[in-house]
Image: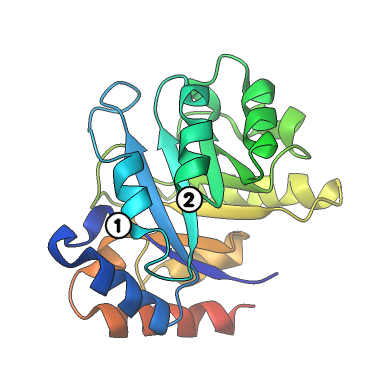
C-alpha cells in the first residue's frame, strides 16, 4: 500500500501559502490536508470554501478536506464544487452517516470517516466498505501542536485488522502529534496516510517534507 504525506495547512503561513504548498509538492508530499472547524463540533474556527477555492490548482496535490463541523452534510456539495478531492466527516457529527457518505460519493469525490480518541473503533464496522479512507484522530480535534496519544497505536492496529479480515483495501489516515520521531511507529501500526502540520511547516519546509518522505518510502 502506498504511503502518503498530507501536510496540514493549519500550521502554514497564510501570507505565503501558495509558495509553501508548492514547496511541499516539489519535496514529495502528495496530499494537502485541509482542516475545517466550525467552533461548535470543536472549539476552534479555521477556514472554509473561499480558501479551498483559492489554493485549488496552485499545486497538483490531492485536496484532502477534513470537516470538523456539526451536520457536515450541509457543506459537502459546496466543498466538492470548490475543489475537494476527498471529504472526511466525523462519525460523531453525522445524524445519518450513511446518507452523508452517499452524498459525498454522489458529488464524485472520495469519502472518509473520522473518529475522535474517545470513540470506539468498532463504531466504524458497519461502514468499512462504504468509505475509501478512515481517519484516526491521535489528539483531541481542534488545536494544533498537541502530543500524540499513545493509545492511538492500538486503535490503528485494530482498524487495520478489521479491514484486512474483510478484504478491504482502504486507507488509514492518522492526524495529530506526528513528527519524524514517531512516524515510523504510526506506519508500522498500519496507517498509510500521515497528516503533519508543525512537523512539516515549522522550520525548513523542504527538508522536513523530504525527511518525512524518506521514512514513508522505507515502510512501503
Residue 174 in picture, x, y percent from top left: 49, 53
- Give the labeled residue for mark 1: 9
Q: Is residue 126 above or below residue 197?
A: above
> Residue at (44%, 45%) from the top-left corner?
82
Q: Which residue lies furthest to the top in this view?
A: 95
In this view, the residue in front, 186 or 38, is 38
> Residue at (26%, 52%) from the top-left corner?
10
Task: Mark 1 or mark 2: name the one nearer the start of the chain.
Answer: 1
Residue 97 in picture, x, y percent from top left: 63, 23
Q: How is the image coloured?
A: rainbow
- Tell me the SS state at disc 2: loop
Give the distance between the C-alpha atoms of the residues marked 1 and 2, in whole angstroms: 16 Å
Q: Which residue lies furthest to the left in this view?
A: 15
State the image quarter where residue 23 is shown. Answer: bottom left
Q: In this view, does 203 lie above or below 92?
A: below
Res 176 visible: no
In this view, the residue in front, 38 or 213, is 38
Residue 215 in picture, x, y percent from top left: 48, 81
Residue 98 in picture, x, y percent from top left: 69, 24
- Give the labeled residue for mark 2: 83
Amino acid at each position: 500500500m502506498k504511503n502518503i504525506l498530507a501536510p496540514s495547512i493549519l500550521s502554514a503561513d497564510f501570507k505565503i501559502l501558495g509558495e509553501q504548498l508548492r514547496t511541499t509538492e516539489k519535496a514529495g508530499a502528495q496530499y494537502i490536508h485541509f482542516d475545517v472547524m466550525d467552533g461548535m463540533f470543536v472549539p476552534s474556527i479555521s477556514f472554509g470554501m473561499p480558501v479551498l477555492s483559492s489554493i485549488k490548482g496552485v499545486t497538483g496535490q490531492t485536496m484532502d478536506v477534513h470537516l470538523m463541523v456539526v451536520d457536515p452534510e450541509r457543506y459537502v456539495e459546496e466543498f466538492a464544487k470548490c475543489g475537494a478531492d476527498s471529504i472526511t466527516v466525523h462519525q460523531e457529527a453525522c445524524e445519518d452517516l450513511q446518507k452523508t457518505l452517499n452524498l459525498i460519493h454522489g458529488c464524485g469525490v472520495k469519502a472518509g470517516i473520522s473518529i475522535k480518541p474517545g470513540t470506539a473503533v468498532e463504531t466504524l464496522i458497519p461502514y468499512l466498505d462504504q468509505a475509501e479512507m478512515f481517519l484516526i484522530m491521535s489528539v483531541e480535534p481542534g488545536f494544533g501542536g498537541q502530543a500524540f496519544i499513545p493509545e492511538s497505536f492500538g486503535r490503528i492496529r485494530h482498524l487495520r485488522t478489521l479491514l484486512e479480515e474483510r478484504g478491504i483495501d482502504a486507507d488509514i489516515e492518522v492526524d495529530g502529534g506526528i513528527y519524524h520521531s514517531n512516524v515510523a511507529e504510526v506506519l508500522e501500526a498500519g496507517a498509510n496516510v500521515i497528516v503533519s502540520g508543525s512537523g512539516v511547516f515549522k522550520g525548513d519546509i523542504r527538508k522536513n517534507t523530504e525527511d518525512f518522505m524518506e521514512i514513508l518510502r522505507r515502510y512501503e
